[in-house]
Image (tube, rainbow, N blue to C red):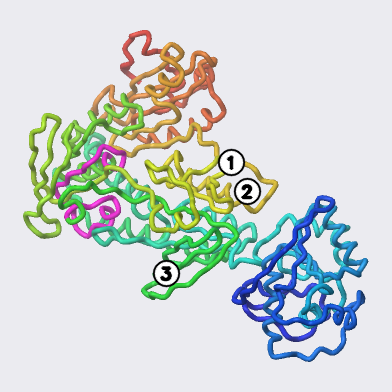
């Protein structure tokens, strides 16, 4: 069906009963009082004369028009455009509108059908309105239909009672009502705020379902001034560049191993930071462009601008490029997918002289001697690859490594890193950073205190903060609509379907309270959410249990489900059986790498047929190993299932099919041979 251009109404007559109207006229303001009545499950509204601006004897409408819709010639007064806007406003602001007359049996028949279907609709009784005859004249001019009832659904002209009955018979009415597309009221069916993995997934899925979608993405520069393109943290300053730099580090180890396999290489091999950085940034640039192309192909309106929510359906848009002008847009649904940004400590010199992962991967110069502050996976991953490419690297740790992960595995990672060139300052908290010398890199003095209260002072070229991340929930207008946040974390409180306490506003990804802060989780949540919003019969929600993840430290760590500590806390130590084993990757044997370093652990619930509730592996390609077993744990695999599986030899992963030593037994988990 043809749609008119925004803010314009075609003044030509038409006999096409399916002619449709603008969805974006909302400049005219008027008051309305409605009396709600319910009958046979349906709801109708009778609109009174406050729609009108002049008084005409009501009985004169009956003289001018009848059920047949015949009208006398109406002189188009100067305010006819205002009348058109009033009519359009009624159509735009209601899903179902019936322009009717109290004396018309066909109008009653149409309303009775809608009531029987429990459809909420707005009735405009033209013979009860002072401007009824003018309304009818405008309707005739716009639709070519002079009779009543004149019916609109979702802003589109359906037609007469006969058209309604026909639509009901051929089931097209059901489809119209099921969609209840509010595009007749709003600029978009969906606005997504945030162009990261989750936001992109939701926007593309909604567009695939035929919805009108806009996506807003704006990167606030870091204190150092770093910004990036479409794609969010993972693509630009997270998973992608992190793993590529991790790969650079692994290649350095492989070069060392290569000599044992007969490769003749120079004794001294140098790494070039600029070459690596440029190659990685070129790849990221291609991904940024690819996302833009995908949005364009799917007809998603991508807007590089800062969006602030004004009310539950309206956002204010600013900072479009460098234009300071602001505009407003509306949507039936809003998804918040703004992600997180790194946290800085509140100490002198932190923001002036420190950097975060927002800056590291695009740093134009080699970082030099680096201090990584924090024991998060971001800190350990960055420290690992910096040391791996030959840089003097130290990690300052306040308490434990990898909080929230299995602590046995976490300490094994720390031990391995210590043996491979990473220094650790345990129990230390930084208190100030001072600049000694400017440059790229510069030179800075870092002062910290240890657990005994003694000062620890050293100099570094780069200070990287990786002490945690904060959700981007401030400054986007959540307070304007009363979206509930966790007061301790400022993350958005959502239900199992990602819905906030505001019915049409949703939150996905890292900003959702208690949600795993992982890219694949956000993508999955975004896709399913879009389908649930726009496909009423689709109800599948994200299963947030047994989600696999990997930490790309020099000794990679993959895990699924419970840590050993969490399993004991949840099920009781007497109900937990832990099977474990060290293993030696075959490729480590010829260059004589450390034995009994790589490790596998299965945590089983004895009270539930030894169901595997925790999976942990330390070793090469841990992510690839873990991904495969994620399906098994999702399906509820038991230790017996693992035992009955024949392994692939020689692989690291086969270890999980032959583990028999339990921690409870006290036997050694160390192994020899293949």
Asked whether disc 2 touches disc 1, contact meaning CB atoms under 8 Å apart, the reply is yes
In the rendered structure, which disc, 3 or 2, sits on the residue that comes first in sequence?
Answer: 3
Q: Which residue does the numbered mark 1 point to in the structure image?
A: 541
User: Start and end of the magenta stretch?
Assistant: 353-380
Residue 361 magenta-drawn? yes
Report helix, strand or loop for mark 1. loop
Residue 143 in view of the camera: no
Which secondary structure lies at badge 2? helix
Q: Quadrant of the C terminus?
A: top left
Circles 3 and 1: CB atoms closer than 8 Å: no
Q: Which residue is mark 2?
A: 532
Circle nearer the viewer, 3 or 2 = 3
Residue at (31% x, 24% y) in the render: 408
Q: Quote the CA–CA distance across marks 3 and 1.
A: 34 Å
The answer to whether residue 564 is visible is: yes
* Inter-mark Cα distance, 2 to 1: 8 Å
Compared with 234, 216 (above or below) is: below
Q: Secondary structure at mark 3?
A: strand
Residue drawn at x 48%, y 54% as measured from the top left: 336
């Amino acid at each position: 069906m043809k749609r008119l251009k925004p803010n314009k109404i075609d003044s030509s007559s038409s006999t096409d009963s399916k002619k449709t109207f603008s969805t974006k006229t909302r400049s005219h303001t008027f008051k309305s009082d409605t009396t709600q009545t319910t009958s046979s499950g349906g709801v109708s509204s009778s609109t009174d004369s406050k729609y009108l601006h002049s008084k005409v004897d009501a009985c004169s409408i009956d003289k001018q028009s009848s059920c047949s819709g015949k009208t006398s010639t109406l002189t188009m007064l100067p305010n006819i455009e205002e009348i058109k806007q009033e009519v359009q406003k009624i159509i735009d602001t209601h899903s179902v509108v019936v322009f009717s007359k109290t004396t018309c049996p066909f109008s009653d028949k149409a309303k009775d059908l809608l009531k029987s279907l429990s459809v909420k609709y707005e009735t405009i009784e033209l013979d009860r309105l002072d401007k009824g005859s003018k309304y009818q004249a405008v309707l005739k001019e716009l639709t070519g239909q002079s009779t009543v009832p004149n019916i609109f659904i979702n802003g589109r002209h359906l037609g007469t009672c006969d058209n309604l009955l026909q639509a009901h018979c051929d089931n097209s009415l059901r489809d119209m009502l099921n969609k209840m597309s509010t595009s007749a009221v709003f600029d978009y069916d969906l606005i997504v705020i945030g162009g990261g993995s989750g936001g992109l997934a939701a926007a593309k899925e909604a567009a695939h379902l035929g919805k009108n979608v806009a996506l807003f993405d704006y990167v606030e520069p870091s204190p150092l001034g770093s910004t990036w393109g479409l794609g969010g943290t993972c693509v630009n300053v997270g998973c992608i560049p992190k793993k590529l730099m991790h790969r650079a580090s692994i290649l350095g180890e492989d070069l060392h191993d290569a000599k044992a396999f007969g490769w003749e290489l120079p004794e001294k091999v140098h790494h070039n930071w600029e070459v690596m950085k440029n190659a990685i940034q070129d790849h990221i640039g291609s991904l940024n462009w690819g996302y833009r192309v995908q949005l364009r192909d799917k007809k998603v309106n991508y807007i590089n601008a800062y969006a602030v929510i004004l009310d539950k359906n309206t956002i204010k848009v600013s900072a479009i490029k460098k234009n300071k002008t602001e505009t407003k847009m509306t949507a039936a649904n809003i998804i918040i997918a703004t992600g997180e940004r790194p946290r800085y400590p509140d100490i002198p010199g932190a923001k002036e002289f420190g950097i975060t992962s927002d800056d590291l991967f695009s740093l134009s110069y080699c970082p030099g001697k680096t201090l990584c502050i924090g024991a998060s996976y971001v800190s350990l991953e960055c420290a690992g690859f910096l040391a791996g490419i030959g840089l003097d690297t130290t990690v300052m740790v306040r308490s434990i490594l990898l909080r929230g992960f299995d602590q046995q595995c976490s300490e094994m990672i720390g031990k391995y890193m210590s043996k491979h060139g990473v220094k650790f300052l345990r129990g230390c908290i930084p208190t100030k950073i001072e600049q000694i010398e400017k440059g790229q890199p510069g030179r800075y003095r870092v002062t910290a205190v240890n657990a005994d209260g003694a000062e620890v002072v050293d100099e570094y070229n780069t200070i990287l903060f990786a002490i945690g991340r904060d959700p981007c929930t401030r400054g986007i207008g959540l307070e304007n609509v009363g979206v509930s946040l966790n007061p301790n974390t400022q993350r958005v409180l959502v239900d199992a379907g990602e819905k906030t306490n505001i019915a049409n506003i949703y939150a996905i990804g890292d900003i959702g309270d208690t949600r795993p802060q992982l890219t694949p989780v956000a993508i999955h949540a975004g896709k399913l959410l879009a389908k649930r919003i726009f496909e009423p019969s689709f109800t599948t929600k994200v299963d947030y249990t047994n989600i696999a993840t990997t930490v790309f430290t020099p000794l990679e760590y993959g895990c699924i489900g419970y840590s050993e500590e969490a399993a004991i806390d949840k099920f009781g130590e007497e109900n937990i059986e832990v099977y474990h084993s060290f293993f030696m990757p075959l490729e480590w044997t010829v260059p004589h790498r450390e034995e009994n370093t790589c490790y596998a652990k299965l945590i089983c619930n004895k009270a539930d047929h030894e169901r595997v509730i925790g999976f942990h592996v330390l070793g090469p390609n841990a992510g690839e190993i873990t991904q495969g077993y994620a399906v098994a744990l999702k399906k509820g695999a038991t230790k017996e299932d693992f035992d009955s599986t024949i392994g692939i030899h020689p692989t690291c992963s086969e270890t999980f099919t032959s583990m028999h030593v339990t921690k409870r037994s006290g036997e050694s988990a160390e192994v020899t041979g293949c």
